[in-house]
């Protein structure tokens, strides 16, 4: 169908996922780490839409719709948790939020 | 179809460059702005893939609602940039980049080794039909009606949870 091969889209998706992984590993600001998780969710969405479009099957796009719902819920709850942590510790640096670390 | 390739090259490189810029900028606000740019580029890619509904929802929900929420929280918390931290922890940076390269090589190997383009021979009309609001709406209200209702409950629970978590008094 499309003239652009499916591999190109999948490579962009893979690259964005890897960049998201790097961000989660090297950034120390909890909100930025959270944004990197959003980036990884989006790369998965791109792969789903790619397969859905190339196979002519709407199921993949319905799934992307659900992923967006979950991402919205996750953003609301996660940011509320970050605000609650900031109130208690006055920081969002994940190196200083280490009570569970051993 | 030279135009399609040009659009793909522009949107793809914007998506890639903005994602790198998002991770490397020390200021959280700049990261958020680059993430918005990345979401817009993705919406363009969705349009190239004939997924009109998802493209519109991407702009409204992700670039509109979720990123505004992020920017509001950044404004409320007023956090510092990470200049010092990114310079200080060089080991962490190298390990992070190494793991990411490993992930990318693995996924790239799977993509090219399994050669998915050999197995897809659908007509373009089917692809356009799959992206229409009508098709997605029909699927959502028939085949996927239970997950749809469950996602409604999930959003309700998330709203209540966010209010409860953010409402606690300062001690």
Image (tube, coloured by chain):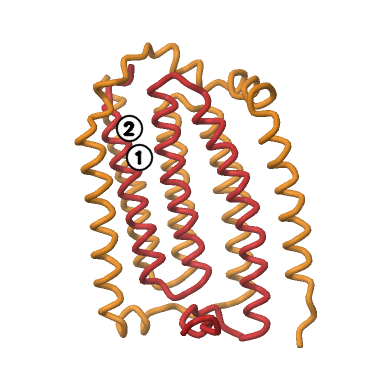
Residue at image location 44% in from the left, 50% down from the top: B37
Q: Which residue is mark 2?
A: B7
B117 lies above or below B87:
above
- How many C-alpha atoms fall within 10 Å of the one at disc 1: few (<14), some, or many (≥20)? many
Distance Cα–Cα, label 1 vs label 2: 6 Å
Q: Chain of mark 2?
A: B
Q: How many marks?
A: 2
The image's mark for residue B124 is: none
Kindly indicate whether the residue at mark 2 contacts the one at mark 1 (C-beta within 8 angstroms). yes
Residue at image location 26% in from the left, 79% down from the top: B91
Which chain did the image draw in orange?
Answer: B
Q: Which residue is mark 1?
A: B11
Q: Chain of mark 1?
A: B
Q: Is residue A14 left or right of residue B33?
A: left
Residue B95 appears at what percent x and percent y?
A: 26, 71
A65 lies above or below B90:
above
Image quadrant assignment for residue A2: top left
Query: Considering the numbered disc 2 on the image, is that residue within a helix, a strand or a loop?
Result: helix
Q: Quadrant of the C terminus of chain B?
A: bottom right
Residue at image location 45% in from the left, 60% down from the top: A36
A44 lies above or below B169:
above
Give the residue at the far front of this rendering. A102
């Amino acid at each position: 169908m499309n003239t652009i091969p499916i591999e190109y889209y999948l490579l962009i998706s893979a690259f964005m996922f890897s960049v998201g992984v790097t961000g989660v590993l090297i950034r120390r600001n909890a909100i930025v780490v959270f944004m990197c998780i959003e980036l990884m969710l989006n790369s998965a969405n791109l792969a789903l839409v790619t397969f859905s479009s190339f196979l002519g099957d709407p199921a993949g796009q319905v799934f992307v719709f659900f992923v967006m719902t979950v991402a919205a819920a996750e953003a609301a709850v996660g940011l509320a948790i970050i605000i609650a942590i900031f109130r208690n510790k006055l920081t969002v640096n994940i190196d200083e939020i280490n009570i569970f670390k051993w | 179809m030279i135009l399609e390739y040009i659009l793909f090259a522009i949107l793809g490189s914007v998506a890639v460059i903005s994602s790198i810029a998002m991770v490397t900028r020390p200021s959280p606000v700049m990261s958020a702005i680059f993430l918005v740019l990345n979401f817009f580029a993705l919406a363009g890619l969705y349009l190239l893939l004939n997924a009109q509904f998802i493209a519109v929802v991407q702009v409204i929900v992700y670039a509109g609602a979720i990123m505004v929420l992020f920017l509001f929280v950044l404004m409320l918390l007023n956090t510092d940039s990470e200049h010092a931290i990114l310079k200080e922890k060089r080991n962490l940076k190298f390990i992070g980049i190494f793991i990411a390269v490993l992930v990318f090589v693995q996924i790239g190997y799977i993509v090219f080794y399994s050669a998915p383009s050999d197995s897809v021979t659908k007509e373009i009309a089917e692809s356009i039909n799959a992206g229409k609001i009508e098709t997605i709406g029909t699927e959502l209200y028939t085949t996927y009606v239970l997950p749809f209702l469950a996602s409604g409950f999930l959003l309700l629970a998330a709203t209540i949870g966010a209010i409860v978590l953010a409402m606690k008094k300062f001690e």
